[in-house]
Image (cartoon, rainbow, N blue to C red):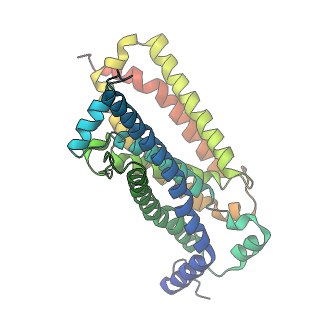
Amino acid sequence: MNKNTLNAQRLLQYFRKDWSENAAQLYYYFIIPYGIMTLLFIWMDFTKTQSVITALEQVRQGLETDSNSYQQIMEDALSGKDDCWTFITLITVLCFYFFMAFAGSTFFKASKYRKGYIADLTFPVSNVEKFIVRWFRISIISFPIFCLATVLADFTRIGFIHFLYPEVSLSFPVPWLSDECDVHIPTAILQAYGLQALFILGGTYWQKKPFQKTLSLVLLTSLIYYFTYFCTVFYFIERNYVYHDARMRWVIGWVFGIPIFLILFGYLLTYLRMRRATLLPSWKDKTTLVVFAALLIGLGLCVWMPNFIVDHFAYG
């Protein structure tokens, strides 16, 4: 065996092996999001179109409609816009967060069972190569698969609604990269990868149910951070702090800075814990101290940041 930490030929062979063994998982990455988003998209579009059909029928019979929103929907449709775009984009982003988090929690799934555990220990590849191959399959390959599922779900929605209501054409494909969606897609992608890095790291600590346990810890930590930040602002700083101009500039910085930090932090600690996580997940490691230190630093920032802004930046 080649003793190098990273060998191109060995890495390529390991890619082929991993692809042949986990091809079914990639199919699930497509089928499950496609099915869920198709049902949600159709339900939203059906609700919109059905309300317009009902309103038009009431107008035709000379009755008063319950709502005049159908007029705005019809005007948007005449200009090539779809009233569902904003809601579809929001649902897609939420599904993408959930999808990336769940995919990240399966990073060590193969090594949790006896057959995969033995193969993972005895297969002649380095930890670097194991990390690269798993990361490529879970973080890189899964992204275009999810995008394809999203686009097909959107076109399925349009085809289904046109089949039900051929006389009314109110559905149009979502312009994902335009400003019509009210969601900044690159920011959402960056945040999803930061969240996934946390769930990949969580898989190194829990052998069973890593997704549920990591999700519980992430939600609990977020609530503690928010509660600390809220108490700091409400009890020790002016209540009109929310209107502070400098605060908004810092928020924009955190929107990009925190996901980048989580990606680097999660990937680095995951690599350092790979051997221990494969043998037996454990908290008794120096990397755990780093995790606790990062949690305490985040808690301190929730107290320090608003006070620093008030002390150094004037209102206005």
Question: Number of numbered discs present?
Answer: 0
The quadrant in which residue 281 appears is bottom right
Residue drawn at (21%, 43%) of the image? 78
Q: Where does the C terminus fall, quadrant-wise?
A: top left
Q: Nearer the viewer, residue 311 or 34?
A: 34
Task: Look at the image and tell me whether residue 265 can be seen.
Answer: no
Q: Nearer the viewer, residue 101 or 28?
A: 28
The quadrant in which residue 148 appears is bottom left
Q: Nearer the viewer, residue 272 or 315?
A: 315
Which residue reaches farthest left? 79
Which residue reaches farthest right? 114
Residue drawn at (41%, 43%) of the image? 45
Q: Where does the N terminus fall, quadrant-wise?
A: bottom right
> Where is residue 237 drawn, in percent x and y?
42, 13
Q: Nearer the viewer, residue 73 or 270?
A: 73
> Where is residue 145 drawn, in percent x and y?
46, 64
Residue drawn at (55%, 82%) of the image? 16
Residue drawn at (48%, 27%) of the image? 302
